[in-house]
Image (cartoon, coloured by chain):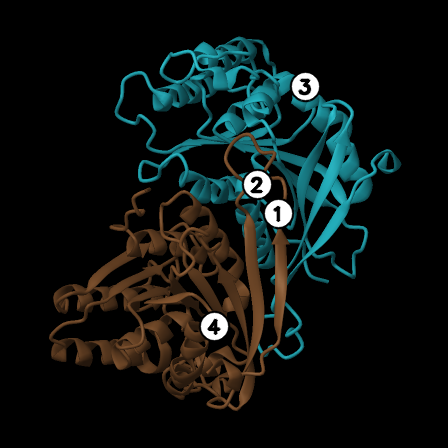
Chain colours: A brown, B cyan
């Protein structure tokens, strides 16, 4: 698999180290190794840039693999997620894991389930004319990105799919339409208004048919339309009540509202809480 | 000033960029420029390593200066703070600012106001034998570090002093003993138990004498001893009631308790809330 990619790889030194031997207290651990790779995708017929955070490998256990968090809008949230995981895993609050930040050149295309040119207010807006690329984008992730990561890194089988806004409807859409791809989902302020509430209808139809769904999902909202009768906010409440009333066997879910946060500040608090929820029962390995 | 420092400077590329011209949506902004410098301190008679985050300079306003956040335990929290500031300032939620992460080779020395070898449980512990270095450390910051930063970077006059645990008592000690040095203080779970509650006594004696204190302070606790009668937690409650009952003119303060967080997870949520509190009234400059 890896030979088919003529990827360029920039090793990026986030070099905050070198003092380790002198430190009298906790070891300095901010030795973050981030890479930017470019994958020439045949599925999408274009190059895609990917940011990758790799935890430090334990020298006593060089074959240990890591869970992988696939992050949408990577250019926006990669730095925060890699900082959280680096810090929290150092203190054994969550396990060390990889972050794969996916960059979308056209996020309205990649991160929407259907083609529609209707905006949040019900007006036609041509900026959405390329929308509806979710399925194509999932094929890229499934056939090219995940195999690439699993061939070239110590990637384990546990995979999290995380997104915000349009990225949030994308992760929910993936859970219902390709439940084999990921184990856990994060949907921060999912844009459930999209295309006449397409994802709400999908959830309604899928949930009645599912016998089980052994997944974990965290979803949240900020202050978007929080006091309005039919709004961004009430769509997420509707999604939550669908999940709560028809919970498939095995589904672990949590909904959190952050009334103090805006659409753009919310990812800071919500991504942290999502990681804590997904790993709430995780225990660090016993020391030998 | 800068000539007196024979500093080595590693330019560290956190290079997540180069796509900007192709992006169809929000510009990719994770172009984080972090540096590690080494300052040969005469005050401390040793070299000190410093991590520095510098916001992107606005090309239309090349002489604009930035507030500076001086961060204790830099090796631990620098990555999180620089990620927050990079992200939040991009969305104009807080202003762009510099982060100066100070690394302590002996944090028990730098970050304690007095010499004591008594631990939290009242037992003698020789790991504290070098304690009591706050005043010496403040002289380094005042006479060497701040002038270095102000000479070599676009550093403005507004300065924040931020610390966690022993770093928390250090920032509070600095507010009372050198109120000319900083404008705002962050004290996340300050170890007020230190040396028979030395800082509580200092606060009590100083607060009665102060006519005004035009500063901003945010302090917080996690779940440390939260249900115990005389504990880490109750010491912070006592500090909060001292502040609330004897608020000097001009002091803006906020106390927040995070019962769901531990001593080591708390900085993630508390540093974010502290930044939002300090800049609660900040408005982005009007676009021309």
- Quick check: A95 left or right of B182? left
- Quick check: B274 left or right of B262? right
Residue at image mark 3: B136
Q: Secondary structure at mark 4?
A: helix
Residue at 59% x, 25% y is: B250
| Front-most of residues B225 and B178 | B225
Chain name for mark 2: B
| Front-most of residues B12 and B188 | B12
* Cβ atoms at labels 1 and 3 below 8 Å apart: no
From this view, report whether residue A89 is shown above or below residue B125.
below
Q: Secondary structure at mark 1?
A: loop
Residue A52: x %, y % from top left: 51, 66
* Between marks 4 and 2 in the image, the one whose residue lies nearer the viewer: 4
Label 2 environment density (alpha carbons within 10 Å; few <14, some 14–19, many ≥20): many
Residues at discs 2 and 3 both on one chain: yes
Measured in 3D between alpha carbons, the distance from the residue under mark 1 to the one under mark 4, in whole angstroms, is 25 Å
Residue at 68% x, 38% y is: B49
Q: Which numbered disc covers residue A236?
A: none
Residues at discs 1 and 3 both on one chain: no
Residue at image mark 4: A152
Q: Which numbered disc covers residue A16?
A: 1
Whether residue B107 appears in this view of the structure is yes
Q: Secondary structure at mark 2?
A: helix
Measured in 3D between alpha carbons, the distance from the residue under mark 4 to the one under mark 3, in whole angstroms, is 49 Å
């Amino acid at each position: 698999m890896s030979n088919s990619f003529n990827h360029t790889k920039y090793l990026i030194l986030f070099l905050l180290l070198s003092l380790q031997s002198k430190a009298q207290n906790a070891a300095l651990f901010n030795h973050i190794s981030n890479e930017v790779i470019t994958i020439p995708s045949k599925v999408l017929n274009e190059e895609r840039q990917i940011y990758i955070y790799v935890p430090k490998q334990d020298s006593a256990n060089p074959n240990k693999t890591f869970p992988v968090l696939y992050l949408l809008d990577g250019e926006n949230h990669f730095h925060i997620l890699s900082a959280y995981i680096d810090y929290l895993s150092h203190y054994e609050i969550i396990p060390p894991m990889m972050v794969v930040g996916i960059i979308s050149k056209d996020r309205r295309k990649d991160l929407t389930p259907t083609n529609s040119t209707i905006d949040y207010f019900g007006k036609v807006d041509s900026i959405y004319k390329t929308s509806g690329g979710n399925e194509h984008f999932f094929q890229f992730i499934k056939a090219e990105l995940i195999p690439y990561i699993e061939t070239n890194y110590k990637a384990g089988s546990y995979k999290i799919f995380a997104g915000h806004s349009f990225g949030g409807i994308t992760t929910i859409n993936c859970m219902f339409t390709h439940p084999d791809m990921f184990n856990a989902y994060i949907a921060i302020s999912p844009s459930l208004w999209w295309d006449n509430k397409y994802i709400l209808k999908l959830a309604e139809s899928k949930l009645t048919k599912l016998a089980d769904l052994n997944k974990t999902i965290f979803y949240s909202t900020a202050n978007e339309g929080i006091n309005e009768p039919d709004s961004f906010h009430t769509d997420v409440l509707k999604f939550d009540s669908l999940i709560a009333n028809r919970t498939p066997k095995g589904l672990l879910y949590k909904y959190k509202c952050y009334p103090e946060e805006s659409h753009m500040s919310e990812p800071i608090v919500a991504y942290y809480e999502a990681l804590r929820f997904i790993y709430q029962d995780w225990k660090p390995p016993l020391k030998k």
